[in-house]
Amino acid sequence: MEAGGCLYQFRIALLGDAAVGKTSLLRRYVAGAPGAPQPEPEPEAEPPTVGVEFYSRALQLPAGPRVKLQLWDTAGHERYRCITRSFYRNVVGVLLVFDVTNRKSFEHIPDWHQEVMATRGPDKAIFLLVGHKSDLQSTRCVSAQEAEELATSLGMAFLETSAKNNCNVDLAFDTLADAIQQAL
Ligand code: GDP
Ligand code: MG
């Protein structure tokens, strides 16, 4: 499938509780693309996401092909789950995002994972666990070690990111895209 000079299009969703930083992470990534037209949004000025929003960014994978990432931002609120559910089937990659300062958001990760798995059945998606807001070390309440353990038990890799400090933002999307490509 040719897509704007790209050999592949990967549809990726960001899932996780409300306010963990999904929109900030996504916008930081998209705004970081060379020549990106999007202005850098002020993280504090972000309204809570309603429904689903779509972004895209092209990416050169180290293993060869140029791919276009279709990035879907979802609201974490329970009442919007019916919207997100309908596109789980077409998603090939998922960033499961929690906030390292929000214990509940970490505890809900297996629920988000299960929801995708239940919707897709045997058609496997590629996941990456993301501990976001890594700049907030003094108030963090989820350790890297327990997050690593959860990721291992769910069969995925783990990374910590910060949209505020622009830490590991590109790496998170690159890692997921690379894993998708290798699973093709
Ligand atoms: P979403 O509901 O998951 O999309 O979360 P948002 O992107 O709307 O962010 C929720 C709140 O977390 C906002 O007040 C953001 O400013 C804040 N936030 C997002 N990313 C970071 C980050 O990397 N570090 C810090 N300290 N705050 C962040
Ligand atoms: Mg949002």
Image (cartoon, rainbow, N blue to C red):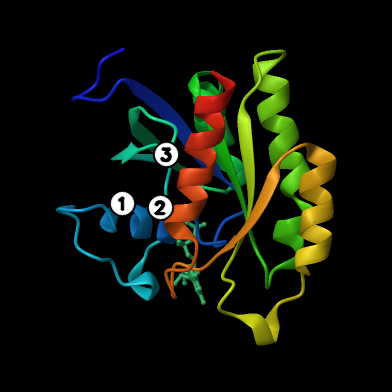
Mark pair 2, 1: CA separation: 6 Å
Query: Callout 2, which amino acid?
Result: Leu
Task: Sort mark 2 into few (<14), some (14-19) or many (20+) by Cα contacts within 10 Å.
Answer: many
Disc 2 + disc 1, Cβ < 8 Å? yes
Q: Residue at x 36, y 33 (%)?
A: 70
The location of residue 108, given as percent across then percent down, is 75, 50
Task: Sort mark 1 into few (<14), some (14-19) or many (20+) by Cα contacts within 10 Å.
Answer: many
Q: Is residue 48 visible?
A: no
Query: Callout 1, which amino acid?
Result: Val
Earlier along the polypeptide chain: callout 3 or callout 2? 2
The vertical placement of 178 against 107, above or below, is: above
The location of residue 16, given as percent across then percent down, is 61, 49
Disc 3: which residue? 62
Disc 2: which residue? 26
Tell me, for residue 30, which label it has, or none: 1
Task: Sort mark 3 into few (<14), some (14-19) or many (20+) by Cα contacts within 10 Å.
Answer: few
Q: Quadrant of the N terminus?
A: top left
Q: Secondary structure at mark 3?
A: loop
